[in-house]
Image (spheres, grey):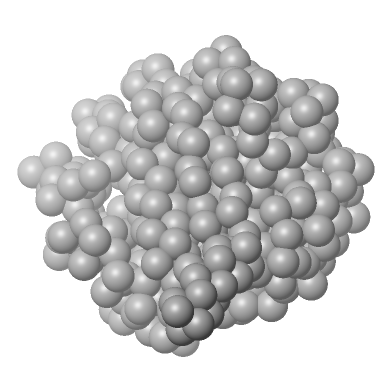
C-alpha cells in the first residue's frame, strides 16, 4: 500500500511540476505567403511534439490562418485573445500583416514571438513593446548580406548594372532608397521599379529594364512571383547575366522547372547545412513528414517552439512575463547556429535573435539549390553568366 501511495505521490508531483502552455499560432496558411506559412507550421508542430514527449513542458497549440491579409489577420488574432484566451502567440510572418497586428498586440499584451516580418516598418511599429521577440533578421540585415554578394559580383565578375523589381508592400519597399544608395556606393548603376504585390504582371517593367541592359535582375517579392518573372523576362528578351531573388520562400517544385536553372537567391538554411542541430532537425522532419524541406521557415518555427519550451522550463511557470525574462537570457544552439537575444541594431526593440550571419547565397543548379557564396559554405561555383533566354 505504501508503495502504491508513494508511486501516486510521485506521479502527482510530476504532474504539478509540468508547465502547461496554451499557445496561439497565427500564420499565412493561404494567400501569397502560404508556402512559408505551411513550412513554418510543420516546424512548429514537430517541435511541439518533441516538447510534449519530453514531458517537462506541455504545449497546446491553437492555430489560425491570417491569409496573408491584414483584413483577415486582425479578427483571427482577436479570436486568439478573446475566445481562445492565449497570452503567448507565435506568428508574424508577412511584414504587412504583422504591421497591421501591432495595434491589437499592444492592446491585448501577449508575449509575441515573431517568425518573420523583416521590414523595419514593423520594427518601428513595435518600438517599446516589452514582450516582442523578433527571431528573423531585419531587412537591413538582409541588405548587408546581399551587399556582400553584390560586392563580390562587382569585384570578381565585373557586374556594373542592377535592375531592382520590388513589391509595393512593406516587405519590398522598406529601405529601397537606402539599398539603391548602397549599391551605387559599390559602383553599380541602379534602376529600381515597384510592382503591385500579387499581380503577376511584370512585362511592362521588364521591357523598360531591357533598355537599361542590367547585368543583374534583382527581384524582391514572394514565391508566387518567381515563375512569372522567370517566364516574362525571357518573353521580352531581357538577358541579364544573373537573375537574383530574395523571397521568404520559393515555389514548391520550382527546381523541377527548367526556367529555374541558374536563378540565384538568398536563404538562411538548407538541409545540407552541416551543424549538428540542423542534421538532427532534418532527420526528425523526415521521420514525421516523410520528406525533407528546403524552406527555412520550417526550422525557424521549430527553433521558436524549442526556445519557448526551454524558457518556460527555466521559468518554472506559465506566466508570460516570467517566460519572457527567461527567454531574454536564453542561449541555445539551433539549425541556424547559436541563438541569443540582444537589442536590435537601431535600438528600437529589445529582443532581436538572428542577424546577417545566418544568410548565404544559393543557385538553382541541375535541379537543386546549391550554396555558392560565401566561399566557406559553397558546394558549387557560381554560374556567371547564367543562361536566361528562350531556346
- In this view of the protein, can residue 183 be seen by the observer? no
Q: Is 217 left, or right, of 308 in this rendering?
A: left
Name the residue rendered at 47%, 29% in the picture: 64
Looking at the picture, tell me which residue is in the foreground, 212 or 114. 114
Residue 337 quadrant:
bottom right
Residue 19 quadrant:
bottom right
Q: Is 291 left, or right, of 277 in this rendering?
A: left
Name the residue rendered at 58%, 28% in the picture: 84
Name the residue rendered at 78%, 42% in the picture: 123
Image coords of residue 165 (percent x, y): 50, 34
Image coords of residue 293 (percent x, y): 28, 59
- In this view of the protein, can residue 45 be seen by the observer? yes
Indicate the quadrant containing the C terminus: top left, top right, bottom left or bottom right.
top left
Image coords of residue 386 (percent x, y): 27, 58
Looking at the picture, tell me which residue is in the foreground, 27 or 57. 57
Q: In the current view of this chain or complex, which residue is farthest to the front?
A: 1
Residue 75 quadrant:
top right
Name the residue rendered at 40%, 46% in the picture: 41
From the viewer's perspective, is residue 327 above or below residue 243?
below
Give the mark count.
Answer: 0
Indicate the quadrant containing the N terminus: top left, top right, bottom left or bottom right.
bottom left
Amino acid at each position: 500500500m505504501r508503495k502504491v501511495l508513494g508511486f501516486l505521490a510521485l506521479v502527482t508531483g510530476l504532474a504539478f511540476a509540468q508547465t502547461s502552455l496554451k499557445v496561439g499560432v497565427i500564420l499565412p496558411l493561404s494567400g501569397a505567403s502560404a508556402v512559408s506559412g505551411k513550412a513554418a507550421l510543420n516546424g512548429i508542430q514537430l517541435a511541439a511534439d518533441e516538447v510534449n514527449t519530453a514531458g517537462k513542458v506541455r504545449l497546446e497549440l491553437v492555430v489560425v490562418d491570417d491569409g496573408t491579409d491584414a483584413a483577415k489577420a486582425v479578427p483571427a488574432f482577436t479570436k486568439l485573445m478573446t475566445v481562445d484566451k492565449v497570452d503567448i502567440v507565435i506568428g508574424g510572418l508577412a511584414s504587412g500583416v504583422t504591421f497591421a497586428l501591432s495595434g491589437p498586440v499592444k492592446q491585448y499584451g501577449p508575449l509575441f514571438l515573431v517568425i518573420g516580418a523583416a521590414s523595419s516598418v514593423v520594427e518601428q511599429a513595435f518600438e517599446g513593446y516589452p514582450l516582442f521577440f523578433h527571431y528573423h533578421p531585419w531587412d537591413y540585415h538582409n541588405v548587408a548580406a546581399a551587399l556582400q554578394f553584390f560586392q563580390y559580383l562587382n569585384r570578381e565578375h565585373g557586374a556594373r548594372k542592377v535592375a531592382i523589381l520590388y513589391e509595393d508592400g512593406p516587405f519590398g519597399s522598406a529601405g529601397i532608397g537606402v539599398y539603391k544608395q548602397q549599391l551605387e556606393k559599390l559602383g553599380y548603376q541602379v534602376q529600381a521599379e515597384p510592382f503591385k504585390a500579387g499581380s503577376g504582371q511584370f512585362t511592362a517593367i521588364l521591357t523598360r529594364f531591357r533598355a537599361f541592359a542590367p547585368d543583374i535582375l534583382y527581384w524582391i517579392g514572394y514565391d508566387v512571383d518567381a515563375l512569372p518573372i522567370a517566364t516574362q523576362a525571357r518573353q521580352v528578351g531581357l538577358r541579364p547575366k544573373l537573375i537574383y531573388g530574395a523571397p521568404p520562400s520559393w515555389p514548391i517544385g520550382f527546381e523541377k522547372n527548367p526556367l529555374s536553372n541558374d536563378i540565384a537567391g538568398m536563404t538562411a538554411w538548407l538541409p545540407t547545412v552541416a551543424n549538428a542541430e540542423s542534421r538532427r532537425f532534418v532527420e526528425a522532419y523526415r521521420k514525421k513528414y516523410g520528406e525533407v524541406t528546403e524552406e527555412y521557415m520550417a526550422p525557424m518555427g521549430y527553433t521558436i517552439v524549442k526556445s519557448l519550451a526551454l524558457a518556460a522550463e527555466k521559468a518554472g511557470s506559465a506566466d508570460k512575463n516570467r517566460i519572457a525574462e527567461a527567454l531574454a537570457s536564453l542561449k541555445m544552439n539551433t539549425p541556424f547556429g547559436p541563438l541569443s537575444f540582444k537589442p536590435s541594431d537601431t535600438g528600437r526593440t529589445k529582443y532581436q535573435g538572428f542577424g546577417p550571419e545566418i544568410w548565404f547565397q544559393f543557385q538553382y543548379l541541375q535541379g537543386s539549390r546549391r550554396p555558392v557564396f560565401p566561399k566557406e559554405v559553397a558546394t558549387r561555383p557560381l554560374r556567371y553568366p547564367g543562361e536566361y533566354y528562350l531556346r
